[in-house]
Amino acid sequence: MDAYIFLLFIIYIAYLLTKFGGLSLKEANNKFLAISFIVIYTFCALRDYSVGRDILGYIKTYERAGDFPFMDTTWTYMESGYVAFMQLCSSLGLSNRMYLCIVYALMILPIYRTIKTYSKDPLLSVIIFVCFQFLTFDLSGIRQGLAMSFCLISFEYAKLQNKKDFIYFSCLMLLSYLFHRSSLIFIFIPLVLRFKLNVKSIIIFIVAVLVAPILTKPLILLNSNNELSRYSFDDRLKMGGMLVFLFLILLFMIYSSIKNRRYILNNENIFYNIEQYTLILMVGIFFSLVFNGTMFGRATMYYTIFIIYAIPNAIKQYKTSSQTIFTMIFHLVMLVFFYLFCLTPQILDTVPYKLGTDLPF
């Protein structure tokens, strides 16, 4: 646990040093993000293979990948795109550690890029990424983590306003699917973006929330062995835990959307549109309820990850005094969430953190 606290300490120190270092706001934010994500990347890429429930299995699979024909998936349950990626790295003679370094470069860079380009409060965005289960999940779920990053890139083209958008979005969605099947859930995002936040959409959401738990049982009973219920998050991250936080965030987003509606409607950039973030979070909560208690629950992160941008950008629409209060509240909320639901339960075997034993130092 100490390593994660130290990670947060470095992030806050980096922010203070860059903020009060005599730089312009843009320069300070860029340097802060560069330092923070170099540290986060190092934290992920150099940790021991025992940190993260699935990592050792991924490493063992990578070691076997070169023994089979290119894109042959008969020997593993993993998707063909990820298998091809492993085999390419294996053919280059990359060690297990180098392979992990490349994996996390592909996973972390899109998050760094989108925060740098679109977040109006880089510090809060980084804290949300680290604290709200996204980082701890990435330490274990490599295939889905990569797929989520590809989907994040595709979001820029999700409005499908022209042929170029359609081609880019389709190609990135295909790439995501070839790395993890769960990314198929993101295919609904262009449809979600066509909706407007109004009384009608809120009523639809309320009805969907009431109906959602009824849809869970058929998913669990899809097969006689109940395999879908074997791989899920800790109970505290289900109905009683994470969803409470998500509903509170949703209430804040709805309030912010209504209060700042004039600004929102005049903003064309998809990453700055608070209304659309609110609708995306609604869909994420709906899927969280439907998939609760099944292995599909982790797929809801394709939608909930957008709180990394939604919360900071929503806060920046308020007056300065209100911005300060909301920012402090969300920093506190994220830190509490991190401790209660990511560190204490040890749901993904990310605690204790250790550096890799194969490192030369």
Image: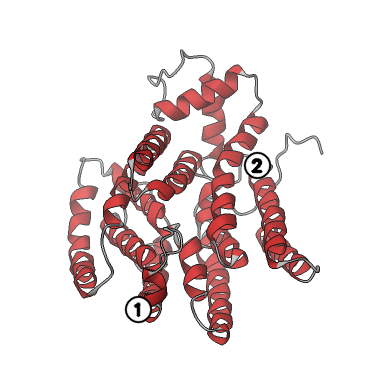
Q: Is residue 86 left or right of residue 35?
A: left
On residue 74, which mark appears? none
On residue 258, which mark appears? 1
The residue carrying mark 2 is 45
**Residue 2, visible in the rendered structure:** no
Q: Position of residue 39 (x, y in %)?
A: 70, 52
Q: Nearer the viewer, residue 286 or 108?
A: 108
Q: Amino acid at mark 1?
A: Ile
* SS type, badge 2: helix
For label 1, the crowd category at 10 Å Cα-Cα, with few meaning under 14, some 14 to 19 and many 20 or more, is some
For label 2, the crowd category at 10 Å Cα-Cα, with few meaning under 14, some 14 to 19 and many 20 or more, is many
Tell me the residue at 58%/79% (across/down). Answer: 328
Tell me the residue at 31%/49% (across/down). Answer: 229
Q: Nearer the viewer, residue 63 or 250?
A: 250
Q: Position of residue 353 (x, y in %)?
A: 66, 51
In front: label 1 or label 2: 1
Q: Amino acid at mark 2?
A: Ala
Question: In what quadrant of the picture does the N terminus appear?
Answer: bottom right
Tell me the residue at 33%/48% (across/down). Answer: 161
Quarter of the image for residue 120 reads bottom right
Q: Nearer the viewer, residue 177 or 357?
A: 177
